[in-house]
Amino acid sequence: MHSASHPDPQQQQALPAYRVERSSVHGNGVFAQRDIEPGERVIEYAGREIGWDVAQARADAQGGPHNHTFFFSLANGNVIDGGDHGNEARFINHSCEPNCEAIEEEDGRIFIYALYEIKKDEELSYSYPLIYEGRHTPAIKRAFACRCGALNCSGTMLAPKPRKRKPRVKPVPLAELAPVAATVQSPQPVALG
Ligand SMILES: [Zn+2]
């Protein structure tokens, strides 16, 4: 860091930090228009805040889960629909080795921050992971396959399904238990030297 070479903040604000163009990863992507500082707030993930039921209805109307990757869940249980009054942030691709992160602020707005210094023309990315509550069928897995190219790429943008309850201990049929109990409780022959 040489503070002398830092761009003047005024000038920096005048330059948009990002632009949208075709990405080699997936569809459109968002690219740094200039160098971006670590921790810099790059863009708001804009969109209308809607309830989960409305989001579900919108997803259904659009023909299923493949098209609703613009939803961003909030701590209050609602989602932000980036496809409704959204901005360029909805084009930021997922990466398993992201250079940005999404942070929900106290007021329920989501902003994308740079994790590291991002050089001009680098593609911006963050790690989603996508919550999809339906069955993770092969078609769904294909639709949300990750092609970020990172060494540690998980191969999917889907979050593991949340465990609603503790993992269940597999019930053991009584018939299987009984012999074990019997073995323990019945006197065992002991070989004495
Ligand atoms: Zn990946």
Image (tube, grey):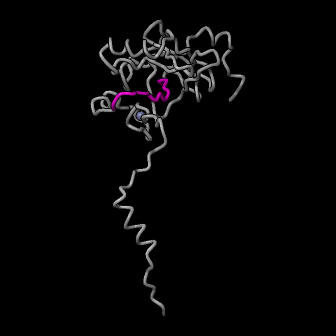
> Is 101 covered by the magenta stretch?
no
Please report the residue visible at 58 percent of the width from the left and 23 percent of the height from the top. Answer: 103
**Compared with residue 141, is residue 56 higher up or lower down, i.e. above or below?**
above
Q: Quadrant of the N terminus?
A: top right
Q: Residue reaching furthest right? A: 4
The residue sitting at 65% across, 10% down in the picture is 11
**Residue under the image location 47 percent in, 24 percent down:** 123
Q: Give the range drawn in magenta.
A: 123-135
**Depth check: 153 or 50 in front?**
50
Instruction: Find out whether residue 131 is within the magenta segment.
Output: yes
Measured from the top left, where is residue 18 in percent x and y? 51, 15
Where residue 174 appears, x then y in whole percent?
Answer: 37, 58
Identify the image quadrant of residue 62: top left
Q: Which residue is most to the left? A: 139
- Position of residue 47 in the picture relative to residue 133 (left or right): right
Task: Tell me residue 191's x, y (percent).
Answer: 45, 88
Q: Which residue lies furthest to the top in this view?
A: 85
Image quadrant where residue 179 sits: bottom left
Q: Is residue 110 or residue 7 the one in the foreground?
A: 110
